[in-house]
């Protein structure tokens, strides 16, 4: 059963609820200790004259936020400016009701408005429901690519012992 949610651009006061959803996602992905940012970080980085990201939220009629999608521009040497979807999540109690589809629709609409030639994101290989959802929307899941990161100690120690 699909429900109509209101999809809108997030505002600074939404960042506490957005952070709660980010933590819910980290818990779902079995990485609860990995969230290091604060609502203040999100406010600082997402608003002002040069925001680092755009965030869309899904809300119910009573204005409770039930989902979010956070995006930012990247540059592809093959395509030019692309839009990266960092996270799209819907609170567990509201999954399967259409909020995720409406959020992805808004991300795609925003990407088209920005003139990007690609919207890209990652999905965990064990998250079969998400993979099926993305495929059902026409996305290509590239199973032969790996996400590579340097963070934490590896980033700090990168130039040591070289």
Image (spheres, grey):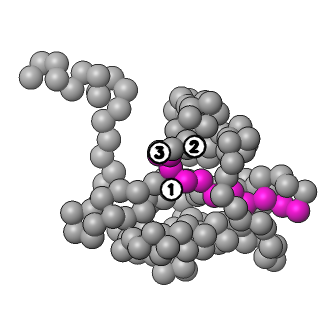
Q: Secondary structure at mark 3?
A: loop
Q: In the shown orientation, is residue 6 left or right of residue 159?
A: right
Q: Which mark is residue 50?
A: 3
Residue drawn 16% across and 18% down? Answer: 160
> What distance separates the C-alpha of mark 3 from that of mark 2?
7 Å
Residue at the spot x=45%, y=69% of the render?
114
Asked if the residue at tag 3 contacts the one at tag 1, i.e. Cβ–Cβ closer than 8 Å, the answer is no
Task: Write the start and end of the magenta stretch as one range.
Answer: 51-61
From this view, report whether residue 139 is shown above or below residue 46: below
Which image quarter holds the C terminus? top left
* Picture residue at 54% right of the left edge, 79% below the top: 137
Observer able to see residue 80: yes
Q: Is residue 56 magenta?
A: yes
Relative image position of residue 92 (x, y in whole percent): 74, 54
Quadrant position of residue 13: top right
Residue at the limit of the structure toward the front, as seen here = 49
Mark 1 and mark 3: Cα distance apart in space: 14 Å
**For mark 2, what is the residue?**
47
In the depicted structure, whether residue 22 falls above or below residue 39: below
Identify the image quadrant of the N terminus. Answer: bottom right
Residue 71, numbered circle: 1
Q: Residues within 10 Å of mark 3 (few under 14, many from 20)?
A: few
Structural distance between the alpha carbons of marks 1 and 2 = 13 Å
Task: Give the tally of numbered discs.
Answer: 3
């Amino acid at each position: 059963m699909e429900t109509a949610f209101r999809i809108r651009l997030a505002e600074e006061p939404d960042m506490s609820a957005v952070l709660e959803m980010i933590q819910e996602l980290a818990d779902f992905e079995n990485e609860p200790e990995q969230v290091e940012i604060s609502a203040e970080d999100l406010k600082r980085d997402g608003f002002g004259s040069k925001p680092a990201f755009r965030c869309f939220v899904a809300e119910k009629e009573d204005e409770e936020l039930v989902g979010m999608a956070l995006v930012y521009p990247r540059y592809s040497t093959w395509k030019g400016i692309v839009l990266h979807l960092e996270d799209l999540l819907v609170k567990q109690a509201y999954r399967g009701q259409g909020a995720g589809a409406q959020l992805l629709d808004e991300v795609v609409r925003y990407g088209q408005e920005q003139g990007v030639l690609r919207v890209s994101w990652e999905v965990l290989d064990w998250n079969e429901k998400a993979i099926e959802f993305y495929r059902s929307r026409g996305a290509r899941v590239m199973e032969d690519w790996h996400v590579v990161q340097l963070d934490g100690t590896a980033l700090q120690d990168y130039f040591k012992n070289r």
